[in-house]
Image (cartoon, rainbow, N blue to C red):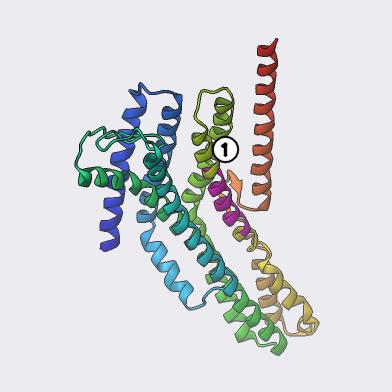
Amino acid sequence: MRVVFFSCCEFTVSLFLAILTYLSLVYSKEDLSMRFYDLLLLIVEIVVCSLIVIRVYHQSQHRDMYQRSQKVGIPENYRRKITTVIKYHLVMSNVIVVIPVLCTISLDWVRMGDPFTFPSIDVLPIKTTNVTVYVCKYILYALPTYFAHLEMCFMNVTFMYSTGAVKGHFQILEERVEEAMATQDEEKLKIAIKYHQQTLKFFKDMKTVYEKSLLIAIEVSMLYIGLSGCTMIQVMQGFVDPIILGLCMGSCVSTFMTISIYCICASNMYDLHDGILNAIFEQQSCFSRNKSFKQLVLMMMTRATVSLEFRVYSIFTINLNLLVKILKFTYTLLNVLLTSVNRQFKETAK
């Protein structure tokens, strides 16, 4: 109940600021730099609202998957990676909040009661000399940053934990298959087949839970890459402040890290069936057993051919090839944009 209440509060604040940012963007009389910053904030707030809705919708499935995975646990290297990701989001959320404060303080002409200055857009232009109101206003603007990192951290950590649980399931399954093949025990092989079926169901449930979130995360990442490229051109032409480009590049680095987590963790699952097949083929004597045992072996071999590919709505497959394609797309986009800018500079020089 507390989680639902916190999620409702989080959603309400994010939606409120998203509406204000949208109105500020539509009726903005500011320069291109501020409109770009408005757009970045609007995208972040929409993504946060979407992830909250998806998380609450799949809350029962998350709880069920966690309870099922607790019996198995995850490999130690996954635990270390999860700890690193949590630390990263904790540090970055505070860094992103502190930088605007330092930028504002560093401006000599800023006085208490002035609307927030660049790089913090002011969608609530309340002029006041009350320090408490001013601080509360800044805290309100800082909340979406923490909410965004909180939602992304939850998504990244739970995805890594789920893929680690799948790997843990397959490690146990491989041991059971090896034991059943070595002793040529039909009952143990039946238990291994049933356990394999449950593991495949866990994998299927995991795909259902994360499909929507992964689609949003990767699409937004591509959008940020495109915006960063456009911003780079605007900075070179003097229309946009370089700080906006820095914010875009920082967001791109964060999105690349997130995509790398998904692609690497998903790729680590693709060869999990190899251990089972190796355990079957290493025991040549099993093929001389009775017919029922052969049928069980063939059943296990057939199920071991099931692909563990993580496809997102048949749009793309989460693997290392996707990461390489995104990197190639980024490199190509930057090359095209830089070539276009150089051509414009040459024409202007003439």
Residue in the foreground of this view, choosing between 72 and 273: 72
Bounds of the magenta span? Answer: 251-264
Residue furthest top in the image: 350
**Local secondary structure at mark 1:** helix
Q: Residue 209: in sight, yes or no? A: no
Establish if 2 lies above or below 325.
Answer: below
Establish if 344 lies above or below 105.
Answer: above
- Magenta stretch, main secondary structure, is helix
Q: Position of residue 237 (x, y in %)?
A: 57, 22
Residue 64 in magenta? no
- Residue drawn at x 76%, y 83% is 286
- Residue drawn at x 40%, y 55% is 150
Establish if 348 lies above or below 188.
Answer: above
Residue underneath mark 1? 225
Q: Is residue 299 left or right of residue 14?
A: right
Q: Is residue 116 left or right of residue 281?
A: left
Q: Is residue 140 left or right of residue 230?
A: left
- Residue drawn at x 72%, y 87% is 182
- Residue drawn at x 77%, y 76% is 281
Considering the image in quadrants, where does the N terminus appear?
bottom left
Q: Quadrant of residue 169?
A: bottom right
Q: How dense is the environment of label 1, judged by Cα within 10 Å: few (below 14), some, or many (20 and up)?
A: many
Mark 1 belongs to which amino acid?
Ile
